[in-house]
Image (cartoon, helix red, strand yellow):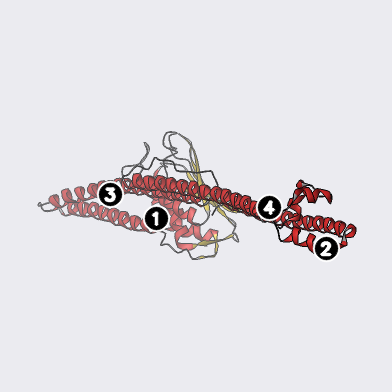
Amino acid sequence: MNRKTIIFVAILCFLLLTSVGINYTLYHKTLDLLLQNDAYIVTNILEHHPELESEVMDSVLDSFQIDYDKLESYGITKEMLPYLIEDDSLKNEMITWNAVGLLLILGVILGYALHNYWIRHRKLKEIDHYMSEILRGNESLDIRDYEEGDYSKLKNDIYKVTIKLREAKDSSQQSKKELQHTLQDISHQLKTPLTSMNVLNELLEKDLPKEKRKELCAKNRDQLDRIEWLVTSLLKISMLDSGTVTLKKEKVLVKDLVLDAVKTIQIPIELKGLELKMEIPDKLTAKLDHNWTVEALLNIIKNAYEHTEKGTITITATDNPIYTQIVISDTGCGIPESDIHHIFERFYRGKSTSKESIGIGLNMSKKIINLEQGDISVSSKQGEGTTFTIQFYKN
């Protein structure tokens, strides 16, 4: 029962009780006045003619056959007669009017109840129609209701559930598209090294000089390493996507993180003739997961190595009360403006990307950094280099 119905019923009950109370009071007041009037008339008659006491009382109280001329001789007119006779007509009239009023009130209540029943029935049919349309796949209907009451609340709740189901459906379809796109990219990434390995194996089956065979075997090994790295990286990304990664955050030296990341790629950097500079305070610490942070830094440093033919890779770290910042910059070819907004997308390969690049390293780094309550941004200028700025927030 909504608030309007409660107020309506309360008002009707109040009016009913008030009407009954007023009529009851009026009836008894009228009866008292009649009795007082009768007593006054009889008293006056008996004062003047005490010898007629028996006759007067019998005539007034028991007999309806009254001699009007005789009454007038005692000062009693015809209009006074109703007050001298015990008559239930007034009482019956009051009861009749009370009954009529009660029936009217009950009629209003019944009409209101029927009206409410019709409204509820109509609203239930509307909700049933809405649910049927949803089951048919029509999710564009708007059932929102801004009125008060349980039905309005139910309609709004159904609308919210419909929106959530629609969003879940859209998300599922988007996930399917992304999965299809990812599988196509994985297939493409695996197809290239596998095709190369098949060609190399065919060449190895031929009678070739020892040095040539060693060269082909080395190339074959490189392709195997590439496949292994791809599979390992995809497993790591799937763990990050599914939320199954549990970070073991602990207080670590930022310099140790960078050194462990550089260690893996330091020899290729030196062989390429690049200069590596590090400006990191020895005692600078941060609360991070050591292994996953090293993985994120390695992918960014590797990206700098791949896009820098000559020059310098610089790694700096600073600290303030809000965050710990690590900046990795290079003097490479830079990133075209059309690519810079897409470099963190999975399997994205820009115009300046090398043929060996797969396009998942930076995507993985961003996921790891975000998981550690951090943020990463990039700025670049073609022909001058690229700078990656990482900020790990403390709270």
Q: Is residue 79 left or right of residue 172?
A: right
Label 3, secondary structure: give it: helix
Pick the front one: 277 or 121: 121
| Residue 319 shows up from this direction | no
Name which of mark 3 and mark 2 comes first in the sequence.
Answer: 2
**Closer to the camera: disc 3 or disc 2?**
2
Name which of mark 2 and mark 1 comes first in the sequence.
Answer: 2
The Cα atoms of the two marked residues, 2 and 1, are separated by 114 Å
Residue under the image location 14 percent in, 49 percent down: 203
The Cα atoms of the two marked residues, 4 and 1, are separated by 89 Å
Disc 3 to disc 2: CB gap under 8 Å: no
The quarter in which the C terminus is drawn is: bottom right
**Closer to the camera: disc 2 or disc 4?**
2
The Cα atoms of the two marked residues, 1 and 3, are separated by 15 Å
The quarter in which the N terminus is drawn is: bottom right
**Closer to the camera: disc 4 or disc 1?**
4
Which dot marks residue 241?
Answer: 1
x and y percent of residue 5 in the render?
57, 51
x and y percent of residue 121 in the render?
43, 48
Tell me the residue that label 4 is attached to.
90
Q: Amino acid at mark 4?
A: Leu
Q: Amino acid at mark 3?
A: Leu
Name which of mark 4 and mark 1 comes first in the sequence.
Answer: 4
Residue under the image location 38 percent in, 37 percent down: 352
Q: Is residue 376 left or right of residue 217?
A: right
The Cα atoms of the two marked residues, 3 and 2, are separated by 123 Å
Tell me the residue that label 2 is attached to.
53
